[in-house]
Amino acid sequence: MKPLLLSLMTAAMLAAQTAEPPRLEIVLSLNGRDGATIQPGEALIAAATFLSTEQTRERAATATLTLWTPDGTQIEHGMRERESTVSLTEGQELVLRVWTVSPEVTTNLAPGEYLAWLETEGQPPAQARIKVEASIPADDADHQALRHLILSHWLQLEAQFDQALAQAEELITLQPGNLAARIRKADVLIAAGRLEEALPVLDDAELQYHALNPEGAHPPRLIQLRQQKVLNALGRGDDTLDGVSSGKP
């Protein structure tokens, strides 16, 4: 029995040593998606979303972003970085890290396809691409919508809240059914400290979500977290969201 027990213990130790660490789930996008298109002089925003657990939290903090030109040269981008975290369940977080490249930098980018490379300790890098084109047709509605969205993000980061709000409202006018446009408007209002104005916008966003999704779809957790954050900041944390969460006016 002793040799068998020793063999089992040895096998367990070897398995523990050779087991791969838990994978860190990452979604990387440039200006909202992989394969977006911008013109020189437009802001570039790289966003990485991590589903982080206690086992992967330290590795999420090691993530570094590099931008490469079409000929393989690293861009000296002088990115600014910010991070926000949302607790989902016990021991699990949704981490959003955002890097921004100013229009002053992108003005000097030559047309072509650029690569973002997000390296995280212990696993292969995540990648996303973006195209820089000298001119884009003015009637390209999807590009115009994305341009309003990204410009609103950029202006918010620059604390130009009125201009950021105007871009979000332009997006709502261009695409009334775009749920992200209403959430963008709410985020600007929250950042500007206009919390009472943000609440009805979030309520509209949740109602729109339920209208777009079939009965029984998952609740819009990130919208509800924003609502609760605003209510807490207003000292109304005990207020319930049931009237909105039901998807009915």
Image: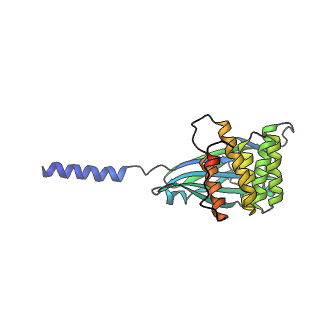
- Count of numbered marks: 0
The residue that appears at 75% across and 52% down in the rendered structure is 185
The residue that appears at 72% across and 60% down in the rendered structure is 195
Q: Residue furthest right?
A: 138
Residue 46 x, y percent position in the rendering: 68, 52
Q: How is the image coloured?
A: rainbow
Is 85 on the left-hand or right-hand side of 191?
Answer: left
Q: Residue furthest left?
A: 1
Is 224 on the left-hand or right-hand side of 89?
Answer: right
Q: Residue furthest top?
A: 214
The residue that appears at 18% across and 51% down in the rendered structure is 5
Is 84 on the left-hand or right-hand side of 25?
Answer: right
The residue that appears at 61% across and 43% down in the rendered structure is 246
**153 is higher (above) or lower (below) than 247:** below
Is 249 on the left-hand or right-hand side of 10?
Answer: right
Q: Quadrant of residue 135?
A: top right
Residue 189 x, y percent position in the rendering: 75, 58
Is residue 44 in view from this perspective?
no
Residue 130 x, y percent position in the rendering: 71, 44
* Between 43 and 92, the one nearer to me in the picture: 92
- In the picture, the quarter occupied by the C terminus is top right
Is residue 19 in view from this perspective?
yes
